Amino acid sequence: MRLIYHPEAAAELVEAAEFYEARSPELGERFLREFDAAVAEVQASPALWAVVEGDLRSHTMRRFPFSIYYRVSGDELRILVVKHHSRHPDYWRHRLAD
């Protein structure tokens, strides 16, 4: 399954990793490893995770307060949002049209 990141989701991922790395050595790397593991789980079973609305689903990371919002289209997994749980619930909605 081909992985595609919305540009804002990619920026959110980098921002989160940099935030954690600035807090504690290697914490940013642990965040990225968990993120990669979560994406692998989604790729293995994309229909398993919670429906947000329509064809949009989310996977909640286990050790960090983030959810990954994604869509599957054919053989593509499109990651639209890497959302920290404290963010406003709808800040990302404009991405649905992308």
Image (cartoon, rainbow, N blue to C red):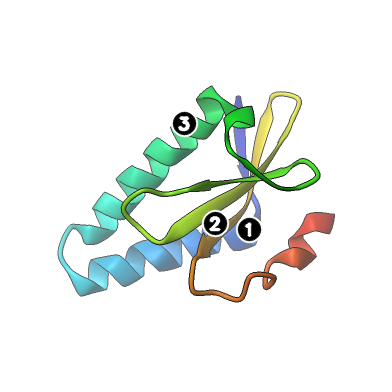
Image coordinates for residue 73, horizontal then vertical, percent: 76, 32
Q: Residues within 10 Å of mark 2 (few under 14, many from 20)?
A: some
Q: Residue at x 38, y 37 (%)?
A: 37
Name which residue type carries label 3. Answer: Glu
Q: Which of the labelled discs sits on residue 23, or is there none?
A: none
Do the residues bearing badges 2 and 1 touch, measured as CB atoms within 8 Å? yes
Where disc 2 sits, the SS reads helix
Residue designated by label 3: 41
**Contact check, label 3 and label 1, Cβ < 8 Å:** no
Residue 96 picture quarter = bottom right
Q: Amino acid at mark 2?
A: Ala
Amino acid type at mark 1? Pro
Residue 5 point in image, percent of width and height: 61, 48
**Image quadrant for the N terminus?**
top right
Say whether disc 3 or disc 1 marks the residue closer to the N-terminus.
1
Residue visible at 54% across and 62% down in the picture: 83
Q: Residue at x 43, y 40 (%)?
A: 38
| Callout 1 secondary element | helix
How far is the residue under mark 2 from the one under mark 1? 5 Å
Q: Is residue 98 visible?
A: no
Q: Residue at x 45, y 31 (%)?
A: 40
Which residue carries the number 2 mark?
10
Q: CA distance from mark 2 to mark 3?
A: 18 Å
According to the picture, the residue beneath numbered tag 1 turns out to be 7
